[in-house]
């Protein structure tokens, strides 16, 4: 279900915790599974549960509690824009509006070509760098002017075309 | 790109290119640990120095660190844990991110010393999921420390053993609450535990545990190097040391400023380049989004320390200073904060789960011209039914902005209700808060 590489990475996480506390690795295991699969299906969650010897419902609880896990398919690039107050005072809303207009979608929607999903995020702890957004949860883009937003979309589109060729 | 503007202690002489072990050692890093281990300091001596320094928890609560450390049953055998809270998600706060990316070894050294002082041999640093690149860097820093013999068995030949690991969050503000954070490390939903028992007696995996903020741990090597007394004198009595203030919102130079405790707010504002576009200061949230808002003119009279901000009716909290100018609609600002708490309530306690929804919906309807005159009373009643009736402080954190915004800007709320629109015209609001990049 998951590749040997992913399982090796999960094993390294398990080793961080005391014997008998495999469950502590569940957040990392779900993250690694999501990186590989793109999102967390019920099968993936069940697989992680089996691997960590946890009841599937306990893994499902974790997957639904933390909002960076995706329980439904998302676009190739998930863009999460922070609009919390400190960001909003420095263009958080403006950045989100610009992306909505450029992509022709609203929050929680995916472009018809399946490339982009747009999400509204809560505080990412980078308020001094507003506007801030995350690409696929892990890459933080800071001080995103309209020009930088356009350039980011262009780069990602180019990346996607190169990957499919 | 660096948000670091001024570092006088933890953030001094470090940046994107100077975060590695060799850089930290060149700045004197790990010398204090070496001294403690080779001179065979007693645990009490370390804790006494920390007490003398008047270092108070930098995560928001401001609890005296030395006192917290003394609660650990260090003389009893058995596993104990030291946990670092780097789950920095309080709107306005972004200091721990800079500490971890520019000076990760200061946190590692502080945690090793804490482990030594409290008889713990294992630690975890819980890092906010949204700063994943910082988590990856911290893992690299840990590897450097292991290779250099600062972590693991028999550290520097002393017989002391300490291991440290990084654990990442994945999007839940509540995990910044220390017992929710412990649940999260245990691989569960991050829902806070009843206290007592406190973590010092029943913490991670049911073992005695001490949890401190990133900046608190990072301060430890510095305060021990200079001595507790000297550290105290950097700040003011009962408010020792340097503090990193994260300044965001309507200022010309948003960023982190590490300055002595007790520095006048007006100086901090000046360091941050003053209010953008020469506009007038309207209000400041001085300690992260959960702290009560303070009108601009009152704030200009404050100094940046726990006691002065408390006198002004607010909290220094995490040192996150959110600056709002005259173009800010206070109803809209509160609406966004209320939405945040509604979204992040973990759902465990009814007053918070239901109450944060009430707060958001009422403020939302006032902002959208559907408010009723009795709504302000309703908001006050809702907050008093949330506060003090929940397991953790999220309910209080959601209520304090509501109470303070209404207290100080009641006219603005009433204007919204009576005229179905804002005192500040929308085009002015948008102009004041457009995408801003300093020159």
Image (cartoon, rainbow, N blue to C red):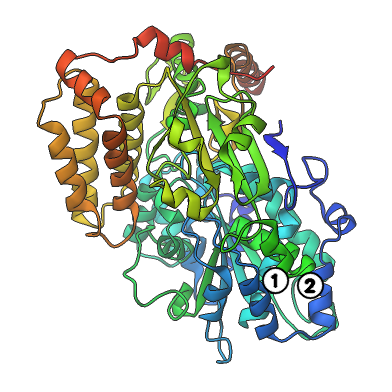
Task: Work out whether residue B4 or residue A92 is closer to the camera in this orientation and state it.
Answer: B4
Residue B298 vertical placement versus B38 (above, below): above
**Which part of the image, by quadrant, shows the C terminus of chain B?**
top right
Quick check: B106 left or right of B27? left
Residue A155 vertical placement versus A67 (above, below): above
Quick check: B70 left or right of B328? right
- Residue tagged 1: B112
Residue located 24% across and 25% down the image? B411
Residue B20 coordinates in the image, percent (x, y)? 81, 51
Q: Say whether residue B404 is visible.
A: yes
Name the subunit of mark 1.
Answer: B
> Residue most toward the top?
B427
Task: Work out whether residue B331 or residue A48 is closer to the camera in this orientation and state it.
Answer: B331
Q: Where residue A106 is drawn, which disc sits there?
A: none
Residue B417 vertical placement versus B127 (above, below): above
Q: Secondary structure at mark 2?
A: helix
Q: Earlier in the sequence, mark 2 or mark 1?
A: 2
Crowdedness near tag 1: few (<14), some (14–19) or many (≥20) residues, C-alpha within 10 Å: many
Q: Secondary structure at mark 1?
A: helix
Name the subunit of mark 2.
Answer: B
- Residue tagged 2: B33
Residue B132 coordinates in the image, percent (x, y)? 60, 44
Crowdedness near tag 2: few (<14), some (14–19) or many (≥20) residues, C-alpha within 10 Å: many
Residue B326 coordinates in the image, percent (x, y)? 43, 19
Q: Say whether residue A44 is visible.
A: no
Residue located 50% across and 68% down the image? A22
Residue located 61% across and 70% down the image? B123
Residue located 86% across and 60% down the image? B28
């Amino acid at each position: 279900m998951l590749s040997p590489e992913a399982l090796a990475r999960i094993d390294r996480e398990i080793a961080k915790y005391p014997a008998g506390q495999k469950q502590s690795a569940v957040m990392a295991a779900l993250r690694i599974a999501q990186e590989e699969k793109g999102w967390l299906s019920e099968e993936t969650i069940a697989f992680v549960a089996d691997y960590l010897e946890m009841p599937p419902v306990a893994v499902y609880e974790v997957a639904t509690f933390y909002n960076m896990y995706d329980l439904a398919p998302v676009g190739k690039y998930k863009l999460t824009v922070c609009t919390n107050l400190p960001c909003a005072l420095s263009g958080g809303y403006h950045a989100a509006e610009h992306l909505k207009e450029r992509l022709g979608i609203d929050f929680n929607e995916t472009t018809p070509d399946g490339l982009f999903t747009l999400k509204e995020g809560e505080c990412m702890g980078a308020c001094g760098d507003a506007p801030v957004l995350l690409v696929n949860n892990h890459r933080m883009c800071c001080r995103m002017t309209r020009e930088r937003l356009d350039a980011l979309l262009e780069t990602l589109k180019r990346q996607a075309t190169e990957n499919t060729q | 790109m660096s948000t670091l503007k001024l570092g006088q202690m933890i953030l001094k002489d470090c940046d994107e290119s100077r975060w590695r072990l060799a850089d930290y050692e060149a700045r004197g890093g790990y010398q204090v640990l070496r001294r403690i281990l080779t001179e065979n300091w007693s645990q009490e001596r370390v804790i006494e120095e920390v007490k003398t320094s008047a270092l108070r928890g930098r995560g928001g609560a401001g609890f005296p660190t030395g006192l917290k450390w003394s609660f650990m049953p260090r003389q009893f055998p058995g596993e104990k844990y030291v946990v670092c809270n780097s789950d920095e998600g309080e709107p306005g706060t972004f200091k721990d991110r800079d500490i971890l990316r520019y000076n990760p070894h200061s946190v590692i050294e502080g945690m090793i010393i804490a482990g030594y002082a409290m008889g713990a041999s294992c630690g975890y640093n819980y890092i906010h999921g949204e700063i994943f690149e910082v988590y990856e860097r911290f893992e690299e820093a840990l590897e450097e420390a292991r290779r250099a013999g600062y972590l693991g068995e028999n550290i520097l030949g002393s017989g002391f053993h300490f291991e440290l690991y990084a654990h990442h969050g994945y999007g839940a503000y509540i995990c910044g609450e220390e017992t929710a954070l412990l649940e999260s490390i245990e691989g569960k939903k991050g829902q806070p535990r009843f206290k007592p028992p406190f973590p010092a007696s029943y913490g991670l995996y049911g073992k005695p545990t001490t949890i401190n903020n990133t900046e608190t741990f990072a301060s430890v090597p510095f305060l021990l190097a200079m001595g507790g007394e000297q550290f105290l004198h950097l700040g003011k009595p009962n408010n020792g040391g340097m503090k990193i203030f994260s300044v965001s919102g309507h200022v010309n130079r948003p960023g982190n400023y590490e300055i002595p405790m007790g520095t006048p707010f007006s100086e901090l504002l000046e360091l941050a380049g003053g209010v953008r576009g020469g506009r007038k200061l309207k209000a400041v949230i001085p300690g992260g989004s959960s702290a009560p808002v303070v009108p601009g003119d009152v704030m200009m009279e404050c100094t940046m320390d726990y006691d002065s901000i408390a006198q002004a009716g607010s909290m220094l909290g995490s040192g996150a200073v959110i600056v709002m100018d005259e173009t800010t609609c206070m109803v809209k600002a509160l609406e966004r904060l209320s939405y945040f708490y509604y979204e992040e309530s973990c759902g465990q306690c009814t007053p918070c789960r239901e109450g944060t929804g009430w707060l958001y919906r009422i403020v939302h309807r006032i902002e959208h011209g559907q408010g009723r005159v009795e709504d302000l009373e309703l908001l006050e009643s809702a907050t008093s039914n949330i506060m003090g009736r929940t397991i953790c402080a999220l309910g209080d954190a959601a209520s304090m902005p509501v109470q303070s915004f209404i207290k100080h800007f009641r006219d603005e709320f009433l204007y919204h209700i009576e005229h179905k629109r804002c005192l500040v015209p929308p085009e002015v609001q948008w102009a004041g808060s457009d995408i801003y990049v300093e020159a």
